[in-house]
Image (cartoon, rainbow, N blue to C red):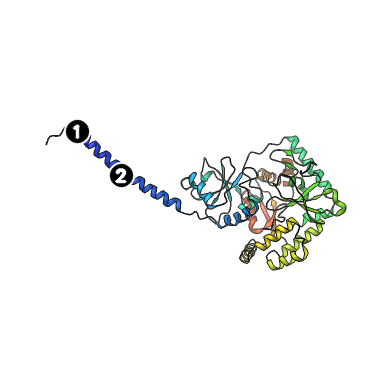
């Protein structure tokens, strides 16, 4: 049979084209089916994220917190970011949980045993480039969700000015036993919006960051203008949400009534919560002793606490909303956290400058102050439950420092 070469060639080419298109259609259909199956798969969020988001949503109602931080409240939100930014391809072992509205994203591991919060970028999702933001989500929330933004570099004059401000404030508060005793024996209560973080007398000015001044923007915040944080107000403690517990230095004759205010409300509206520091500390001790006895704690509030006070009303409602299973789990968690201990640096070791840099960062000190502190024979680094100090212990030991623990009674 004689074929027209051109015709045969065209026919042959046509046959190949048809086969190719049909094969591609099959591949595309299979791929689309795979994508549907893949997107329908649920992300198994770690238990510590579930615990965190319950607390977060109770405190924060707005979508954006602290002006820029967007915390993803639902699995659907997380899934949307996970798919949009192709985490499964580039960072499959991690889950996005928040971003800074500017390209940086906070992620956690899918491994339930790894509770750390890591920093990445939507543009460069690489495991080897992850940086640790915090030891866990709850602690990150306590610190107001910081991302590693560039901080203002203070001049030598500014550093000296802050050192002087700290010295002056230490001189002002040290003569009052009520203040020094309150800070000497901190009563930390978790989960009820009560004090968890306390100032130290030696560095009390630096604890005023965010209230008296803003260290990031390097500006003074305290003012006598209505709604502003007054210069005479001194923050002695704060809760997980950075809400301050403070006194007025002008009220020494009244033995320092204690005030509370909600952070991030646009202006400061102090609420008096105790007649004096001593009474406040006694109430905290009683609450701490009954923390996981729901019936006993509610009875104590009914008989001894003014429930018309906005703060105490909020605390009481939080207690009532805890179901028995939650309290039981909290007790179990509380017991597994170990004893409350002091973590000391007993010897800074061979990497002196690295440890000094860590002290500078942790305590908000100047280089001179951190150097001076490093010369102390024993440095109190942190007070917390032993479980939560494991990260700090490892960090210090990795730097070559020798640490010691002191169990608190």
Q: Is residue 233 left or right of residue 124?
A: right
Q: Secondary structure at mark 2?
A: helix
* Quadrant (top left/top right/bottom left/bottom right) for the N terminus: top left
Where is mark 1, residue-wise? 7
**What x and y, as percent, mark residue 385?**
67, 58
Q: Residue at x 75, y 35 (%)?
A: 157
Q: Do residues under tags 2 and 1 come within 8 Å of each other at their CB atoms? A: no
* Quadrant (top left/top right/bottom left/bottom right) for the C terminus: bottom right
Q: Residue at x 16, y 32 (%)?
A: 4
Residue 364 figure quarter:
top right
State the residue lying farthest toward the top.
6
**What x and y, as percent, mark residue 274?**
80, 57
Q: Residues within 10 Å of mark 1 (few under 14, many from 20)?
A: few
Q: Is residue 139 left or right of residue 258?
A: left
Q: Residue at x 55, y 52 (%)?
A: 74
For the question of whether residue 158 can be seen, the reply is yes
State the residue lying farthest toward the right.
253
Q: Is residue 46 left or right of residue 321?
A: left
Question: Is residue 186 or residue 5 the one in the foreground?
Answer: 5
Question: Is residue 223 or residue 140 the one in the foreground?
Answer: 223
Question: Is residue 302 or residue 281 the one in the foreground?
Answer: 302
* Label 2 – label 1 distance at C-alpha: 24 Å
Q: Is residue 337 left or right of residue 377?
A: left
Q: Residues within 10 Å of mark 2 (few under 14, many from 20)?
A: few
Residue 266 figure quarter:
top right
Where is mark 2, residue-wise? 23
């Amino acid at each position: 049979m004689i074929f027209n070469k051109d015709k045969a060639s065209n026919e042959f080419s046509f046959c190949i084209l048809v086969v190719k298109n049909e094969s591609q259609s099959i591949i595309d259909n299979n791929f689309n089916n795979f994508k549907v199956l893949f997107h329908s798969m649920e992300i198994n969020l770690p238990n510590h994220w579930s615990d965190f988001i319950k607390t977060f949503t109770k405190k924060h109602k707005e979508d954006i917190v602290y002006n820029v931080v967007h915390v993803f409240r639902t699995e659907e939100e997380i899934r949307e970011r996970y798919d949009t930014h192709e985490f499964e391809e580039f960072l499959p072992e991690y889950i996005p949980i928040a971003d800074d509205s500017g390209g940086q994203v906070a992620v956690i591991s899918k491994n339930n045993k790894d509770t750390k919060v890591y920093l990445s970028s939507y543009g460069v999702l690489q495991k080897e480039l992850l940086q640790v933001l915090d030891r866990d989500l709850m602690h990150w929330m306590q610190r107001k969700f910081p991302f590693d933004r560039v901080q203002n570099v203070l001049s030598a004059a500014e550093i000296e000015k802050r050192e002087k401000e700290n010295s002056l404030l230490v001189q002002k508060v040290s003569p009052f036993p009520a203040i020094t005793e309150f800070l000497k024996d901190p009563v930390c209560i978790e989960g009820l919006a009560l004090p968890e973080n306390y100032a130290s007398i030696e560095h009390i000015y630096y604890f005023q960051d965010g209230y008296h001044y803003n260290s990031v923007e390097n500006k003074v915040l305290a003012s006598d203008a209505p709604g502003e944080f007054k210069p005479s107000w001194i923050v002695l403690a704060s809760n997980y949400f950075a809400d301050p517990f403070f006194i007025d230095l002008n009220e020494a004759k009244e033995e320092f009534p204690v005030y509370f205010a909600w952070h991030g409300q646009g202006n400061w509206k102090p609420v008096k919560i105790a007649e004096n520091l001593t009474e406040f500390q006694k109430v905290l001790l009683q609450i701490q002793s009954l923390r996981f006895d729901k019936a006993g704690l509610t009875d104590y509030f009914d008989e001894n606490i003014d429930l018309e006070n906005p703060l105490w009303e909020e605390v009481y409602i939080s207690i009532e909303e805890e179901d028995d299973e939650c309290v039981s789990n909290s007790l179990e968690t509380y017991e597994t956290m170990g004893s409350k201990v002091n973590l000391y640096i007993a010897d800074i070791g061979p990497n002196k400058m690295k440890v000094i840099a860590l002290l500078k960062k942790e305590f908000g000190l100047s280089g001179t102050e951190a150097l001076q502190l490093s010369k102390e024979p024993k440095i109190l680094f942190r007070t917390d439950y032993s479980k939560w100090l494991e990260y700090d212990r490892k960090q210090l030991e990795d730097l070559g420092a020798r640490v010691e623990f002191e169990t608190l009674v």
